Amino acid sequence: MTDYVSTTPGLFPLPDWAKDDLSDLKGHQKHDLISGDEGEEITAAYEQARADVLEVQREADLDRVVEGQLRWDDMLAHPLAVHDAVETRGIVRYYDNNNFYREPVVTGDLEFDGDVAAELETVSELIDDDDLQAVLPGPYSLFDLATDEHYGDDEEFLAAVGDFLAGELEAFPDHETLFLLEPSLVTESPAEGLDELASEAIDTVAAATDADVVVQSYWGALEEKVHAHLLDADIDAVGYDFVSNQEDNLYNINEYGTADDISLGLVDGQNTLVEDPEAVRDRTDWVFDQLPVAEFDTVYLTTNTETFYLPYNKFEEKLAVLAEAASLAEVTPA
């Protein structure tokens, strides 16, 4: 029997009160402040905001709970932006939207840091291990968002990023699921040769955890060869953005297959229109109706992108939609 799991890719919006308080505390110089050296008042504000988003997930009755990544001012670039061997320089547009991050320039060996593990530890003490989902940038996306001034060539740098993330992951508390977020596999598709190395780097990260590993791509569909190589990695599920691109994602699955589990991005993580749970369930059925074989051990129902872009009240409503849609799917499976 298929298990339907409601979850998110993390990277939540800050609660409204926290946006105001943290803006004041940071002196309106958000990108000039190196995360991790915030001081007691800012640290306390983030701790309260983390508790708030944890409570929102509990109230929604999501099957997997994430830390929220509220400190990730630099979005997916965060694990490098706070690293001692990285210099943060100019402000760079974050993919093709109105958000920005500080460019992380790697100037030395990417040794263990522990910043993300420390964040996750605070949540693991409050919930069951079976409910906890870890979130990391995928190695190719982190490689794509960064600039290398140390390793010297793309192949070595990508491998180093994979090794770095694997080392960070090994320090994580026990968790049931890991979401590796890989939008760059879609938006900046790896060139010939690098597509295979991207899969190898993902495999390196996945090997560092006993959790179920979901590689969540978004903002479109993977190119055919990238999708085929991704399936060579020892992962449990591929995530597909069915909000942005239905046709090409279905083609990839039908042509090349997919993993034993699947993650369906069916709720829009950027649009404020709140979906109906029954409609999301119907979309799930529709996807499976398009596949010759639609038997999966686990189906993750999630937003198609991170939810950072949403107003906080819409974010709350969308979590509830995901949880209810998963419950409906369990009752009336495809």
Image: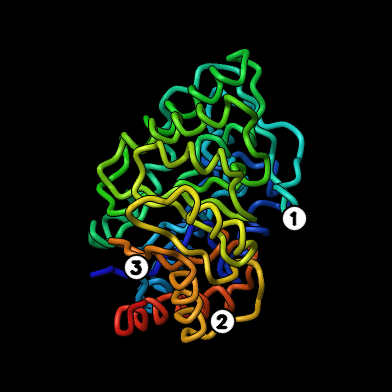
x, y percentage for residue 70?
Answer: 53, 56
What separation in Å lies between label 2 and label 1 (alpha carbons)? 22 Å
- Which of disc 2 and disc 3 is earlier in sequence? 3
Q: Say what amino acid the circle numbered 1 marks.
A: Asn
Q: Of the numbered discs in the image, which one, if any, rests on residue 5?
A: 3
User: How is colour applied across the structure in the image?
Assistant: rainbow
Q: Nearer the viewer, residue 28 or 283?
A: 283
- Which of disc 1 and disc 3 is earlier in sequence? 3
Name the residue at 57% across, 65% down: 242
Name the residue at 52% across, 64% down: 265
User: Residue tagged by mark 2?
Assistant: 275
Picture layout, residue 75 above or below residue 247: above
What separation in Å lies between label 3 and label 2 (alpha carbons)? 17 Å
What separation in Å lies between label 3 and label 1 (alpha carbons)? 29 Å
User: Residue tagged by mark 1?
Assistant: 97
- The answer to which image quadrant residue 34 occupies is top right
Q: Say what amino acid the circle numbered 2 marks.
A: Glu
Picture layout, residue 214 above or below residue 77: below
Q: Are marks 3 and 1 in contact (CB under 8 Å)?
A: no
